[in-house]
Amino acid sequence: MSITVVGQQSTITGKIHLASGESVSHATVRVKGTDISSMSDKNGQYALNNVPYGNREIQITAIEIESKTVQLKVHKPIHNFSIAVSATGDIAIEGVEVSRMTEKKEMETSGFAVAVIETKEASLRNLTTNELLDRAVGVRVRQNGGVGSQVEYNLNGMSGSAVGIFLDGTPIATFGSSFNLNNIPPAMIERIEIYKGVLPSHLTGDYVGGAINVVMKKDASANNITAAVSYGSFNTYQADLSGMYRNQKSGFTTRASGFYTYTDNNYEMWGKFAMITDAEQRLKRYQRFKRFNNTYKSVGGRFEVGFTDVPWADQFFVGYNISDTYRDIPHGTTMAQPYVGRFNEYQAHVFSLNYNKSNFFIDGLALNVNAVYSKRNTYLQDTARTMYNWDGTPMVRILNGEPTPLVRRPGQGQQGEAVMTSIDRDIVNMRTNLSYTVAHGHRLSLNHNLNTSRREDEDLLNPNAIVTGNDRRTSTNIFGFNYEATTFGDKLRTNLLAKYTINQNHYTSSNGGITTLTNRNPGYGLTVSYNVIPKLFLIASTENTVISARDEQIFGSPENSILENLDLKPERNVNYNAGFRYTAFEDQRNRLSLYASAFWRNGYDKITVQAVDSVIVGRESDANIETTRYINLGKTQSRGFEAELTYVYNNRLSVLVNLSRFNSLMKVKYDENGRLNRLYNRQLPNEPYFMVNASAQYRIDNLIQKRSTVNFFYNSGYVAPFQTVWIDSDGWFTTPRQFYHDIGGSYRTPNGRFIVSVDVKNILNAEVYDNFGVQKPGRGVYMKLNYMLNNLTGK
């Protein structure tokens, strides 16, 4: 007789993470008293196999974290057991960068011209997402005024439709104007990826200048709630609230976040456009006034429910976004004439579906699907006729010996014809990515991106009027292929891409017929990264592709003073980028890192903004540009470089300096009549071409209380003068030199739950301008309170 005893065994999987939810890679996870161990991957995931049933001690160790031992009763075949750990000395992992390659560094050395902004510290301060972007190397955020004003992003001279703006891989325009980078707080963001030139497969789209991808926080391994509220200059309120919950047993996960922003935007202006017209119609310039009729308020929420880390999905979420915004429009494209009574209201309802699964049916096959349907409405009202000065008083003229308010003709508003317009937009965006790892270091990807937009305008002032050209639709299908390879001992990384774009624009012409324009264009690109020595990476990329105009560039955007141009053609670009990343010095206390990149871009039929003279007949004021339209500029060429230096001392002091310098020139030598083009070899107007940013941060531990942390911050920015229009002989329309400084500080309590911060922006009250010479806020003081509650039970 023989007796066989079989001991029951279990598999334990989970994630190693900080209390804030950040993943911890390369941590050793061991079952104490056995030889069973594992190491967490770059996402913090680990797996322990063949663990005997019973009470077990799980030990976690790594250089950058405090060792931890936790108890687990092993009593079932599969355990999902995520573990929260603490960084050594209360320092975030990214601040202790050891020889392992972090996700940030892996992205930045992948061959793409990409920079990664991590928002951990910024989320504790009174900084907007746009302010973070404006400090990144080669990035310029073009904003027509203060909080809530129209924004355009410039990446080393490329802007408009050439640059994609994404939220978790979905074009952010899908979510509507009331859910944008102006009002998404950094606390809701995991990181920001800035690509210049070639884009990776998951962002394949109708872009060529690059893209900004905002990655929202998703890690639900540490159930938590975070909240923040701030108040500051110009009667600015901001608040945000977010929470994550995951049931460790079932994988059920829910995420919710919301924000509220309000500001009067009544900052002082004193530049060249700060002027009044007296009763004799004489201009008095360079006065000092507070902006008025400039209120902005926005509220929004994001709700998701689904499952994470379950056998049938790594992530599965259905979501709903809702947002509502009110915005006064204080002036047109320039500040030459103030408006009173012109305003916008935006609403958006967005439904989303996200599904991600690695090892989909077979090992090495991964499927990602991201589908979004957005229903948006924009209301524009402009019916007031009275004209105003920048001091808030009506303009007057002497009539029959008496001062009389100056009003526009009947039927006019502040900008052109009086309007009460409701614009409905239905947008569908669906991205599908199927990738297969053929062998170690070799992966193939197939991608498809569908984007459709339908717009209908309703004239509420004349509800019975027939609106010509009301049926306006665009549709874009993009098919992409990528081959990624890692060879020569993981030193050489290459990414070959090809795509084919089919774009269609439909609109009703003036005679009532339907016009359909179709463009079919191929494109291709290549990225290369080579690890020459352990700390030096050479990076290069090239791309030749065509991009189509966006719907607002073709059909106009009344709320943003953009006129339509139905003849707008696609733009083709040929781009080259080459650079390096080098850790020049690194020991236990010091780290010095360098980055530099040069680029050469050739554009054909470049889509760019053209200023349009006043649409109100009879205006007498100078430089009275109220509207713009997008046009094809012909051939352009842009060449330049960017560089960045980062120094860290003892993980307490960090200093960063970056600069970007380029020229972007008109290269059409002869006009249509064969005459020499007077704009040939001129710098494109309204584009800053030389920028420098510098920042420093210093941390002091145990200053007020034991285990408390105090941080001090400094930031400065410089923008060289640039012309705002093509020909500016007297310098009136040249944007002057700008040089500003910000300071701030924060205090974190010992338990890490409360953080109080104070920021003083533009402390010297410098004169700062942006798009088309619009003055930005001067000195502002802001205070913010953050609260974080982590490690909520999720059993």
Image (tube, rainbow, N blue to C red):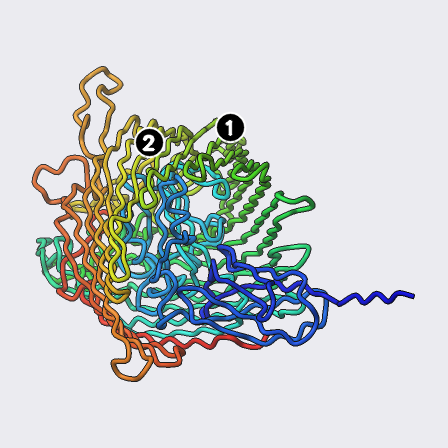
Q: Which mark is residue 289?
A: none
Of residue 161 and residue 791, the one placed in the foreground of this image is 791
The reply to whether residue 339 is in sight is no
User: Badge 1 is on which residue?
Assistant: 518
Label 1 or label 2, whichever lies nearer to me, is 2
Q: Quadrant of the N terminus?
A: bottom right
502 shown above or below 400:
above
Of residue 161 and residue 18, the one placed in the foreground of this image is 18
In the image, taking residue 448 as reference, residue 598 lies left or right, namely: left
Q: Quadrant of residue 782?
A: bottom left
Q: Secondary structure at mark 2?
A: strand
Number of marks in the rendered image: 2
Residue 438 position within the rendered picture, expressed as x and y whole percent measured from the top left: 59, 36
In the image, taking residue 307 as reference, residue 162 lies left or right, namely: left
Determine crowd level at label 1: few under 14, some 14-19, many 20+ residues with C-alpha closer than 10 A: few
The reply to whether residue 32 is in sight is yes
Residue 588 position within the rendered picture, expressed as x and y whole percent measured from the top left: 28, 61
149 shown above or below 712:
above
Q: Quadrant of the C terminus?
A: bottom right
Farthest-out residue, top: 674
Q: Which mark is residue 576?
A: 2
Mark 2 is on which residue type?
Tyr
